Structure formats: structure tokens, C-alpha cells
Image: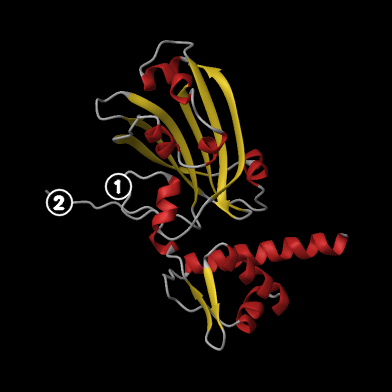
């Protein structure tokens, strides 16, 4: 029993190391990874551990191993966060890069609007709201933490699946279309509670996007705080000198 737990943790650690290597080296779709022997040497683990980590990433449709040729990247994580001027949900952003995010944890609770949320969403004080907290990632690897606050009446007909996927898409199915947002990008250094919540063993910087989403009429629909793991996401903005 103990041996299995240690092995599983080591495979998970190597999987994270492979993902970090892919992002650190700026690899894109079609890139060939180093051999299993080289990866084992790089991460100071056995080849069987590397094989299991690669197999897990193959199941997540990140890697593909071709017999006699090697292991290749079939997703395009180097594009995650590019063109941040285009408004996309985290689900859409990852999917455009060939990555399918899974929801690792969901918590939701009913709250009442305080002065800050009342101002941001343009609603009366103590209006009923839903606070949604989610951890999303690749298999069991957390890549981002999301907090969304939304008026309760917008979620009246939500199914259980709506809480796990893209909120943008769930709202659109109810006839509520997000047209634009006003966002702030804030560097965030997580504390111990945040690291524990995401199951991270070491402190890494996150990029916090704090934004209010609006429909085409300018009605505030949603207040979000999205925390992006900086080893896996980067943001690019086109700047013009007028």
C-alpha cells in the first residue's frame, strides 16, 4: 500500500516536470521530446516512472508516442494565453490549444451582495448571488483556480454539468451572451492556504485576472477572479504606438 502511494506521487511529480519542461522550452505542436532515457536522467528517476508519466499525458491527449520515432507533442500549450485581447473562457482558451481541461474540484454557495459586488455588478445590496469556486487542470494536475460571482437568477436552470464546464457556454445556452469584459492583470504570490487548496507542494507565482463581464447592452453579468499557474499560462497583448 505504501509503495503504491509513493510511486503514484512520483509519477505525478514527473508528469508535472514534463509539462513544465514543455512550457519552459516553448515547445509547440509537433515538437519531439527527449528520449525516455534522457528524461529519466533529467528528472533523476527511473525509466518506468517516465513511461507511466508519458502514458498519463497520452491519455490526456497532450503527447503521442510513435513506435521507433519517439514521443511528440500533439497539443499546442505554447499558445495558452496568447492574444488575451480576445475574450475567451479558460475552457475555450485551453481547447483552442488542443488541451481539454477537467474540473478537479467544485464548490458553490449562496451569498448576498456586499458593497463591493453591488457596485461592480450594478445590483442592490444583499441581492442573492452564487459564489462558484473551481480548480481546473489536466487530469489531476491543477493549472488554474477560478472564483466566479453571478446573480442567482441567471443560474436558475443550471444543470450539474453547467457548473463544471465553461460558464460562458452555460450562460449562452440560457440566452445570456457575454460580449466583453473589463479586466486587471495582477501578479499573485500564493499563501500556504492557497497552495494547500490546490495541492501544490511549492510556491509558484500566479497571474490573477480580475474582471467584470458584460453583455452587449453593457449589463454586468459576472465578476470573476481567475488565477493562472504562471508555469503553464502566459499572456500576450498587442500594443500599438498611435
Q: Earlier in the sequence, mark 1 or mark 2?
A: 1
- Residue, x 50% and y 76% (percent of image)? 72
Q: Residue furthest bottom?
A: 68
Sort mark 2 into few (<14), some (14-19) or many (20+) by Cα contacts within 10 Å: few
**Residue 86 numbered mark, or none:** 1
> Horizontally, is 166 left or right of 47 in the view?
left
> Horizontally, is 60 left or right of 223 in the view?
right
Report which residue position mark 2 lands on.
241
In this view, 101 is above or below 197: below
- Residue, x 81% and y 59% (percent of image)? 5
- Residue, x 38% and y 21% (percent of image)? 121
In this view, 36 is above or below 129: below
Quarter in which the N terminus is drawn: bottom right
> Horizontally, is 156 left or right of 13 in the view?
left
Q: Residue furthest top?
A: 125
In this view, 33 is above or below 137: below
175 and 41: which is toward the camera? 175
Q: Select label 1 or label 2 by which is in front.
A: 1
Q: Position of residue 76 (x, y in %)?
A: 42, 65
Q: Position of residue 211 (x, y in %)?
A: 38, 34
Amino acid at each position: 500500500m505504501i509503495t503504491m502511494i509513493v510511486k503514484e506521487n512520483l509519477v505525478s511529480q514527473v508528469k508535472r516536470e514534463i509539462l513544465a519542461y514543455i512550457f519552459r522550452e516553448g515547445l509547440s505542436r509537433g515538437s519531439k521530446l527527449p528520449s525516455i532515457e534522457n528524461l529519466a536522467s533529467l528528472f533523476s528517476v527511473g525509466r518506468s516512472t517516465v513511461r507511466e508519466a508519458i502514458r498519463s499525458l497520452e491519455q490526456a491527449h497532450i503527447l503521442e508516442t510513435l513506435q521507433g520515432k519517439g514521443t511528440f507533442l500533439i497539443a499546442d500549450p505554447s499558445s495558452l494565453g496568447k492574444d488575451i485581447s480576445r475574450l475567451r473562457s479558460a475552457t475555450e482558451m485551453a481547447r483552442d490549444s488542443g488541451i481539454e481541461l477537467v474540473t478537479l474540484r467544485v464548490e458553490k454557495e449562496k451569498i448576498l451582495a456586499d458593497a463591493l459586488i453591488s457596485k461592480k455588478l450594478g445590483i442592490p445590496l444583499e441581492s442573492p448571488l452564487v459564489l462558484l469556486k473551481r480548480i481546473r487542470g489536466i487530469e489531476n494536475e491543477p493549472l488554474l483556480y477560478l472564483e466566479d460571482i453571478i446573480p442567482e437568477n441567471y443560474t436558475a436552470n443550471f444543470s450539474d454539468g453547467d457548473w463544471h464546464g465553461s460558464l460562458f457556454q452555460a450562460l449562452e445556452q440560457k440566452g445570456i451572451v457575454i460580449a466583453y469584459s473589463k479586466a486587471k492583470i495582477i501578479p499573485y504570490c500564493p499563501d500556504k492556504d492557497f497552495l494547500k487548496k490546490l495541492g501544490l507542494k511549492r510556491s509558484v507565482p500566479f497571474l490573477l485576472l480580475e474582471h467584470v463581464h458584460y453583455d452587449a447592452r453593457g449589463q454586468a453579468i459576472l465578476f470573476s477572479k481567475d488565477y493562472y499557474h504562471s508555469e503553464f499560462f502566459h499572456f500576450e497583448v498587442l500594443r500599438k504606438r498611435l
